[in-house]
Image (spheres, rainbow, N blue to C red):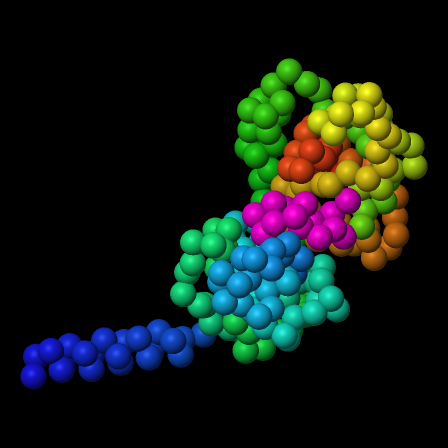
Amino acid sequence: MKFALNLILFISTYSLFAQSQLVVEGFVQSSGLPESFKEKLHLNYSEFILTDTENRYLLESAKVSRDSWGKYVRIYGQLLPNNEWAFDSEVLTIDSLEIISYQERNTDRKPLIESIMYGSFPDHDPIKMKGQIVRNKRPAPDIKYDYLLITKEPVTYNNPPSGEEFILIYEFPLTWLDIDMINHFEHFIKEEIEIELLGYLGSGYGENLVFTTLEINN
C-alpha cells in the first residue's frame, strides 16, 4: 500500500510538472543543429534557437520559421527532458509565439569588454572595420556566429590553415556581447546601413577569421 501511495504521488507530481508552462523571451536565431544530433535527441524540428545573453532554447516546433528569424519574441511552451546531446541548450516545445518589441536593457559591458581585451587579446589593439551586416546560420548551437560582416575591401589572410599562401576575405562571422547588441545588428540589417565596428579579428571555429565585436561606432 505504501508503494502504491508513493507511486501515485510521483505520477501526480510528474503530471503537474509536465503541464507547467514556461514563458521566455529572446531573439530567434538559426540553431545549426546537425541532423545526426536531431536523431540522437529524437527531434523533428529545432532548426531555430531562442537566445538571450545567458540562455539558449532549441525550438522544437513547426510554429517557428524563417519569418521569425532575427525577431524578438515571447514564447509560451514546455521544456523537454534535458539531454547530453543538446549542446548545453534546453529543448523547448511551443504552445504559442508572438513577436514583441524589444526594450533596451543597457547592461554594463565594461567587465566583459575588459575580459576580452586583457584575457583573449592582451597583446593587440582593437581595430575598426566597416561593412554591412547579414544574418548567418550558426555552425552549431553553442557557437554564436549569428551574423556576418561583409566588407567592400578584402582582408588578406596570410598562411591560412587550408595551406594557401594567402586568401582574400570579404565576409567575417561576428560575435556579439549581449542582447542589446543583437537588437542593434537587427536594426542595421533592416535599414541596410553600413556600419563601423570596433573589435578584434582573430581565428575562430572552422578555420574562419572571426570579428569579436566590442563596440558599434554608428
**Span shown in magenta:** 135-148
* Rendering quarter of residue 68: bottom right
76 part of magenta stretch: no
Residue 123's quadrant in the figure? top right
Residue furthest to the left in view is 1
Residue at image position (82%, 39%) is 171
* Left or right of residue 214, residue 85 in this image: left
- Among all residues in the image, which is located at the extreme top? 123
Secondary structure predominantly adopted by residues drawn in magenta: loop
Taking depth in this image into account, of 25 and 150 the one nearest to the observer is 150
Going by the image, does 170 lie left or right of 207?
A: right
Name the residue: 73% across, 41% down. 173
Instruction: Count the numbered circles shown.
Output: 0
Quadrant of the frame with the N terminus: bottom left
x, y (%) of residue 35?
60, 59
Task: Answer yes or no: is residue 180 visible.
Answer: no
State the quadrant of the C terminus: top right
Question: In the figure, 137 relative to 59: above or below?
Answer: above
Q: Position of residue 86 (x, y in %)?
A: 49, 55
Residue 204 left/right relative to 44? right
Q: Position of residue 19 (x, y in %)?
A: 40, 79
Residue placed furthest toward the right: 152
Task: List x then y, in percent, for residue 178.
Answer: 62, 45
Q: Quadrant of residue 148?
A: top right
